[in-house]
Amino acid sequence: MKYHSTRGEAPVLEFEDVLLAGLARDGGLYMPEAWPEISANDMSALAGVPYADLAVRVMSPFVGKALSDTELGDIAGRAYAAFSHPAVAPISQIGSNEFLLELYHGPTLAFKDLAMQMLGGFFDHVLKKRGRQVTIVGATSGDTGGAAIEALRGRSSVSVFILHPHGRVSDVQRRMMTTVPDKNVHNIALDGNFDDCQAIVKALFNDHAFRDRTSLGGVNSINWSRVMAQIVYYFAAGLVLGAPHRAASYAVPTGNFGDILAGYAAKQMGLPVDRLIIATNVNDILARTLATGEYKVEGVTPTTSPSMDIQVSSNFERLIFEACGREAGEVRGLMSSLGQSGAFTLKEPVLANIRKDFDAARADEAEVARTMRETYEASGHLIDPHTAVGLAAGRKVANGASPLVTLSTAHVAKFPDAVKEATGVTPALPSHLEGLMHRDERMSILPNDLGAVRSYIEEHL
Ligand SMILES: *Cc1c(COP(=O)(O)O)cnc(C)c1O
């Protein structure tokens, strides 16, 4: 499989180089040249297969010759053995036609583990083969950092630097990053918000001299292999609910648009998907864009769902690329307008294409709290604030024609204060994380300044 940049001015690459590159050199994001299809017959045969085997079937065409199915299967087997539920991503029913897709059974209790554990295996494999080292730099709104650190800690070919917005992640999220003792792990608490962290990471990638000197690699969902690994659980859920014969709708708590883009990819590959519902909290740039066609960056408001406190939604660029018929020139124009004026407007046919597959809705803080409480009272299920955004938004637009699957993106124990406030119940950390709140922490607080971050990384390599 070959990969093209959404901005059309970077080299066309194969899977391994896309994995190592992260962001394309023209500032764009890599996309597979074509969507591989899984026929209805092949899909029927996948019902009930173990998750790791399903992962091989879904990912193999994207990986191409870079890994044999046996190698891919080894990586998947190791990645998903660390999960605390045998189904890896089980479905639970919370209402007559409502389901949760539980994506929080991995080591750091959020959906990021499902892709990041694979990414750790991919990096290991490719770097060993090439005898190379990489410097991973990533931005986190809370969950990516912990998942990346957990997947890459102690791996000798990788150094990891994670930027998080100082004071804006939950205690559990921060401690999952800062209490890891491995020498290859470095935490930077940036005096800024998540968009500032992400802007610095993108600027480091666009500094080609620094990028080459440090062999920079990325773990944010700008890295295609993360989106790829997330396609698998849409198939897992769809198969349980009757694919290829019956379609479902998916409500996805959305920030950087990586998770829901994987749902779009699953649909392109043949999974029956009715609606893809973009769920946002009050940081609702995507809901506004779907309503008006104008993508306009505003300030970020901190909420109880901090992993979605984002305005610049990187992977939306991949959807725009698709929706404008893969015209890279059009994407370049929109992105340069975004850089210059903080906004762009989608042409009517592009917006219409997006609306064919997607709806969007937002949930405010009162709705989130009410959804957590009502779900607990009605079904006995405790859900975290991100999942509550998904469910509340999903209910606003669901048409009742198909089952509504809300992606449950984090474990309640990651956001205990908001859960307790809404339901009166204090969720306990799973046993493998006992002691987390008492371990020593390591992090450096840096100003919101590209030069300061660049020097810090070079000094600590
Ligand atoms: C990262 C994250 C999201 C947002 O996912 P995107 O792929 O960035 O849209 C939602 N919920 C939780 C718990 C997350 O960690």
Image (spheres, rainbow, N blue to C red):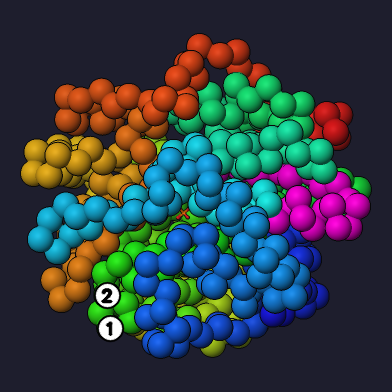
Tell whether circle 2 marks a residue whose Cβ is less than 8 angstroms from ligand 1. Answer: no
CA distance for labels 1 and 2: 6 Å
Taking the image as shown, residue 305 lies to the left or right of residue 180, namely left
The answer to whether 179 is drawn above or below residue 6 in the figure is above
Q: Is residue 263 visible?
A: yes
The answer to whether 226 is drawn above or below residue 243 in the figure is above
- Residue 136 colored in magenta in the image: yes
Q: Which mark is residue 245?
A: 1
Pinpoint residue 18: horizontal percent, then vertical percent: 73, 66
Pointer 1: residues within 10 angstroms few (<14), some, or many (20+)?
Answer: few
Question: What are the residue bounds of the magenta stretch?
Answer: 122-144
Residue displayed at 50% across by 19% down: 436
In front of the other: 132 or 261: 132
In front of the other: 55 or 292: 55
Which residue matches tag 2? 242
Pointer 2: residues within 10 angstroms few (<14), some, or many (20+)?
Answer: some
Quarter of the image where the N terminus is located: bottom right
- Residue 125 colored in magenta in the image: yes
Callout 1 amino acid: His
Residue displayed at 29% across by 26% down: 427
Pinpoint residue 400: horizontal percent, then vertical percent: 13, 71
Q: Are marks 1 and 2 in contact (CB under 8 Å)?
A: yes
Callout 2 amino acid: Gly
Quarter of the image where the C terminus is located: top right
